[in-house]
Image (tube, rainbow, N blue to C red):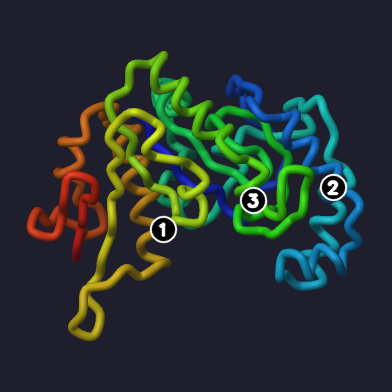
Amino acid sequence: MKIIISPAKKMDCSNNESNLSFSNCTFLDEAKELTKILKEFSPSKLSNLMGISPNLGLLNADRFSNWTLPFSQKSAKQAILMFKGDVYQGINSNDFEREDFDFAQKHLRILSGLYGLLKPLDLMQAYRLEMSTKLENKKGKNLYQFWGDSLTQCLANEIKIDKESCLINLASNEYSKVLKFKDLGIAVITPVFKDFKNGNLKVISFFAKKARGKMCRYIIKNKITSPDRLYDFNDSGYAFNSNLSSDTEFVFVR
């Protein structure tokens, strides 16, 4: 079973004091190509491109300016330790044991606008580049065109080698749509988390992000390799609802 999640805007850029082993991202050449384009952007141009504040434009212009290869544990950090958004608060890797990191490294993949497809222990430097960014490049006018089929092919190859039977899609639509699910050759299951609000059942983004992270943690900590075991997920008051679910969408409500 493979799991995909989105990256996060919030990052922990403190010194890397971890003794964890690390790996290298598969798509560093592509990341270098994108960074080369972005190094030419002024802070104000970055702000306009990404719809961010002048301060964030300045911060990320500096990040791209200083982005260099090769990465080391002094200049970069493992992806699962770097990202600190709502999903990653739910994952809470701070208390992971070695066996948890090993399981995550094999089964979890993080989609990224800059790095393409990250393993949890891949070294990365901080950045801001959402998948929906309309960054012109030699392959097209946006990042979906830049990445094309490459991420799908990479993931499909991993799935074939590892003989996986399904993909658990815990990524947002912005990121998951960079993949062509029908070309992966396995079942794709998307967990959906809904809350009652004003008498209606709906997805509330803030809660759904944390729930996706907690389900990811649940899978990793319990070493789950069969989707049937997701029915028992009940963190934060969510419970599986069979009436609202289908073979491809597992709905959890509270």
> Is 68 or 116 nearer to us in this picture?
116
Residue 249 sits above or below residue 59 on the image: above
Cβ–Cβ below 8 Å for labels 2 and 1? Answer: no
> Is 245 or 183 nearer to us in this picture?
183
Cβ–Cβ below 8 Å for labels 1 and 3? Answer: no
State the residue position of label 1. 209
Mark number displayed over residue 11: 3
Please state which amino acid type lies under the numbered disc 3.
Met
Residue 176 location, x and y as percent? 46, 48
Residue 209 sits above or below residue 68 on the image: below
Residue 47 location, x and y as percent? 79, 68
Q: CA distance from mark 2 to mark 1?
A: 31 Å
Mark number displayed over residue 135: none
User: Which residue lies at the image location 19% right of the left edge and 65% below the top edge?
Assistant: 254
Circle nearer the N terminus (1, 3):
3
Mark number displayed over residue 37: 2
Relative side of 111 to 180, left or right:
right
Relative side of 202 to 43, left or right:
left
Q: Locate the N terminus and report the quarter of the image it occupies.
A: top left
Residue 93 location, x and y as percent? 46, 39
Badge 1 crowding class, 10 Å Cα cut-off, few under 14, some 14 to 19, many 20 or more, is many
Q: Residue furthest bottom?
A: 198
Question: Under tag 1, what secondary structure?
Answer: helix
User: Which residue lies at the image location 69% right of the left edge and 59% below the top edge?
Assistant: 134
Circle nearer the N terminus (3, 2):
3
Question: Under tag 2, what secondary structure?
Answer: helix
Residue 250 location, x and y as percent? 21, 50
Please state which amino acid type lies under the numbered disc 1.
Lys
User: Which residue lies at the image location 62% right of the left edge and 22% below the top edge?
Assistant: 22
Which quadrant holds residue 186?
top left
Badge 3 crowding class, 10 Å Cα cut-off, few under 14, some 14 to 19, many 20 or more, is some
Q: CA distance from mark 1 to mark 3?
A: 16 Å
